[in-house]
Amino acid sequence: GGNTYGRSRNYGKETESWIMSMNTIKKNWTRTKLEILPQFTYYKNTTNNLVQSATLSVAPNEKYRGASLDSLFASPASKQLKEAMLNQLSDHQLNRMRYYDGNLSGQIQWKMPQSPDGIILKTENRYFNKKNENASIYDLNYKNGVQDFRNKYNDKWNLNLRTIWDACYYYNGNIDYKYRFSAGLKYTHIYDKNNNDLFRLDKYAEYGGASNVGVGYLPSTRDSLQRAIDADNSFRSHINKDRYELTGNTPSIKLPVFGLHAFLSPGVNYRSERIDYTRGAYKKKMTRNLWSLEPTLFVGKDNCHFKYNVKKVLPELTDILDITTTDNPLNLWSGNPNLKNTDIHRIDFFRGFYKYNENFTSRRAIEIKAYWQLMRNAIGQYVTYDRNTGVVHSTPMNINGNWDMGASFDFNGILDKKNRFTLSNRTEIGYINSVDYVAIEGESGKDPRSSVRTAKANETVSLDYSFGKYSFGAKLRCAYIHAEGSREDFKTINTADVDYGLNATLELPLKLRLFTDITLYSRYGYSDKSMNTNNLVWNARLERSFGKFTVMADGFDLLGKLSNVRKVINAQGRTETWYNTVPRYAMLHIMYKLHFKPKR
């Protein structure tokens, strides 16, 4: 029915500062071990951004990236682009944010006298306090000449408290460690409080589109600010979540086949969740309680096992409220009170082969892994899209048909008796059936479900050779993707990414050490020809130590061959996007090592 094309860019300046403390305290007694982990973080951030974007009905013919935006925001704007424009947005944003994050976790383990049995008590406690102030001068223009100008100020505050207590008794069985089991109870409480006030300062003429007022400029009195509140997009919420879990494992049972053993984790859960929510005239108090069985079955022997487990995921309480947010006119969102819980079924297989030397360190290791996963009542975003304006309206809805499977083979080992050659190899294959909603306004008669089937194969191998202070290596990575879709407009995807290169570590005169690697990145089969590229990237690091000081000089992409455009294809195969980056740089590090020995 016709494509639409988007262009956007973001000019930003960001400053941030933080202080973080992470500590570990341990104490051991004869039968008791204690560990305490206090952590604290203070973070402050300020950003000043200018966002410019446009949605067009035809693909712009650009001589350089961003040319269409330059033309649209020039004065006078390009007539040809104006005719193709569906919407044009300029958004000047000023954001201030700070938070305190404190966490106190720990555990105590007590062994019973004259017994290998014991009790473990774990706890984790978090305090998170976040304050956001966002100001925005938002100027949106549609093709029909309608302007939506908004001078917004958003005052947000979030308090999150979480406490987890987990008590477990473990029985280690008889002298041969048979019939071992464990039983415990885990309690989790989460309190989340949100105050979100959105003010529309453009209600006052002096803050309107003709005022040229600066972003973040506020009225002088609190009363004037309160009279400008956007009640329908301001909200208060109090959420309490309590969860009780019966943890532990049953005794292992010997099966009459291949000497296998099996045990079960019952996974009995009870959840009680409450929300008190206010948005404008909408008020809602709601409680939901759920008993669930989320077992894990383990069957195995030595280095071989199967594992099957079930998980139940509840939709967020705010997703099941009957509300619609309109603070962003190009992206509307509505809740869905009919959302169901999501069930995830997963099977894992593992087989390992290991060879050790006389010191019981691994000399060679082979690991084979496989999995299968199915999601029932997964939550997708049902999106309606207006081609005439570029407005997106999304609603969470349940959808079935999502499943995936995969397998991998890993080898890591030393190849020779002198321990000089090391080979690493990883082979992966996978299949994904991704189902989501795709809908266009006015085309409701078409099936909104989109199913994309993707097969993947990856191969990564590296060979390293080392002697003394010198080492050399070679590496190769190949990734292949084949995707087919049920939509009529879906084009089959067959792409391959191939990377191969060399690396070395060398001792140079004057006590210098050189670390260097060179890699060729190649891409094939993409429908956008600009994605089929070959980029030769050379990186190097030069290092020198002076007592406790270490000086390092880094050079990334010394040849300047890496494109500043990265493109990806998402799970639904719908988009090929690019991100501007800074690929080439040099950096100098100066480090000083501190080491304090405790007094005895």
Image: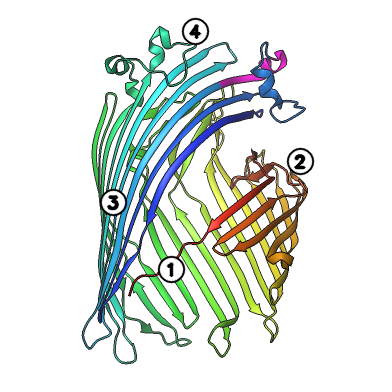
Q: Are marks 2 and 1 in contact (CB under 8 Å)?
A: no
The residue type indicated by label 3 comes to Arg
Q: Secondary structure at mark 4?
A: loop
Q: Is residue 449 left or right of residue 191?
A: right
- The Cα atoms of the two marked residues, 3 and 2, are separated by 48 Å
Residue that lies at the very extreme toward the left in this rendered image = 113
Q: Are marks 3 and 1 in contact (CB under 8 Å)?
A: no
Closer to the N terminus: mark 3 or mark 1? Answer: 3
- The Cα atoms of the two marked residues, 4 and 1, are separated by 64 Å
* Vertical comparison of 30 with 494: above or below: below
The residue type indicated by label 2 comes to Ser
- The Cα atoms of the two marked residues, 3 and 1, are separated by 29 Å
The residue type indicated by label 4 comes to Ala
Q: Residue 526: percent from the left, percent from the top? A: 74, 46
Residue under pointer 1:
308
Residue under pointer 3:
162
Residue under pointer 4:
210
Residue stretch rendered in magenta on the structure: 78-89
Viewer-proximal residue among 22 and 205: 22
Q: Are marks 2 and 4 in contact (CB under 8 Å)?
A: no
Residue ID at (35%, 64%): 24
Image quadrant of residue 134? top left
Closer to the N terminus: mark 2 or mark 1? Answer: 1
Label 2 neighbour load within 10 Å: few <14, some 14-19, many 20+: few
